Amino acid sequence: MMRHILSAHQFEESDLKKIFDITDEIKKHPYRWKSALSGKLMGTLFFEPSTRTRWSSEAAMLRLGGQTISMPFAASSSTVKGESLADTVKNCSQLVDILVIRHPEANSVQEVAKYSDVPVINGGDGANEHPTQALLDFYTIKQYFPDLKGKKLLFTGDLAHSRTVNSLTKLLKDVEVCYGIAKNPLMSKFDILTKMLRYTEEHALKQGVVKHNPTCGIWEEDIPDLLDTFDIVYMTRCQKERHIGELKPISEFIMTKELAEIMKKDAIIMHPGPRNHEISPDVDTDHRAVYYEQTKNGMWTRMALLWDLLGEHHK
Ligand code: NCD
């Protein structure tokens, strides 16, 4: 059976357990896995810039003994000659065993996956989803907090446009989630929150993801006073490229060394990358900063996922 990885919604608790158990094994004995996918070929089709997602997907395949093909940049694909994305995907899927696709339009990867004859991994579709980032983020969180009940997580930055936040929230069932909100004179806290969450109230409640009321949103300027109450602070950059024709949300919260000191000793500071100015570089040496570990876990978890999708148990 072919399985596409398109949304973090897909991951049942048993899937997560399986992938994370394999991840632990791979991390412990990477050498034992060096030929696990020998002979398999991965293609990456990225129509948006990427450093971590593309490299860690490729590194994952190479470390499992497989190989990869990429496009140097989107303009080098035949979509600029008038080919539809669906046709590009159909053709490319004849040549490889798995595709990783990133595209600036929300839901585009889900749409074109239908045309692929091999599994498709969504490497990010617009502001919508980034399921493998959710995997690595959740894996990292679980390393520090195996039991998440009662833990508090704060998201900061450009939350309305962040696909990593949108995907991760789908896995955070036991966590109390709070959103740091930049002030907008035209909107109330509740309106901003609702827009940011991109959920209907009913949907959010059904997911059990957030308590959908204004108390799960705090103004960014109040964050410093509340920093010592959070176990996880997950920060994102301002997604300038997605602000076309929109009021630009100005995020003002910047994590500094002094502010990190206020946090609980065993709290963690996360960021999916690329970091802009929202975390000052002197926080990097603080033991609470785990963003480089996230990058590394991205490779380990993607190795586990690739094995799960393509390993010889499928023969
Ligand atoms: C993010 C992305 O591209 O969604 N980065 C990543 O994949 N690790 C976040 C971003 O672009 O800000």
Image (cartoon, rainbow, N blue to C red):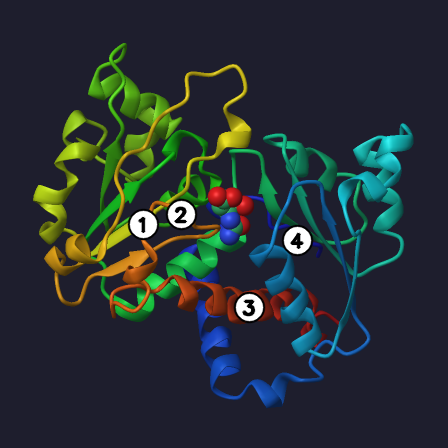
Q: Residues within 10 Å of mark 2 (few under 14, many from 20)?
A: many
Q: CA distance from mark 2 to mark 4?
A: 20 Å
Q: Left or right: where does residue 112 sit relative to residue 232?
A: right
What amino acid is labelled 1 in the image?
Tyr
Q: Left or right: where does residue 228 sit relative to residue 273?
A: left
Q: CA distance from mark 1 to mark 4?
A: 29 Å
> Disc 2 or 1, which lies upstream in sequence?
2
Q: CA distance from mark 2 to mark 1?
A: 10 Å
Q: Quadrant of the C terminus?
A: bottom right
Q: Residues within 10 Å of mark 1 (few under 14, many from 20)?
A: some
- Place residue 266 in its image quadrant: bottom left
Q: Nearer the viewer, mark 2 or mark 1?
A: 1
Q: Residue at x 80, y 34 (%)?
A: 85
> Disc 4 or 3, which lies upstream in sequence?
4
Q: CA distance from mark 3 to mark 1?
A: 19 Å
Residue underneath mark 4: 3
What amino acid is labelled 4 in the image?
Arg
Residue 146 seen in this snapshot: no
Q: Left or right: where does residue 261 sit relative to residue 277?
A: left
- For label 4, the SS is loop
Residue underneath mark 1: 234
> Disc 1 or 4, which lies upstream in sequence?
4
Residue underneath mark 2: 168
Residue 26: percent from left, percent from top: 53, 80
Above/below status of 10 relative to 217: below
Residue 70 seen in this snapshot: yes
What amino acid is labelled 3 in the image?
Met
What amino acid is labelled 2 in the image?
Leu
- For label 2, the SS is helix
Residue underneath mark 3: 299
Label 1 with label 4: CB-CB less than 8 Å: no
Label 2 with label 4: CB-CB less than 8 Å: no
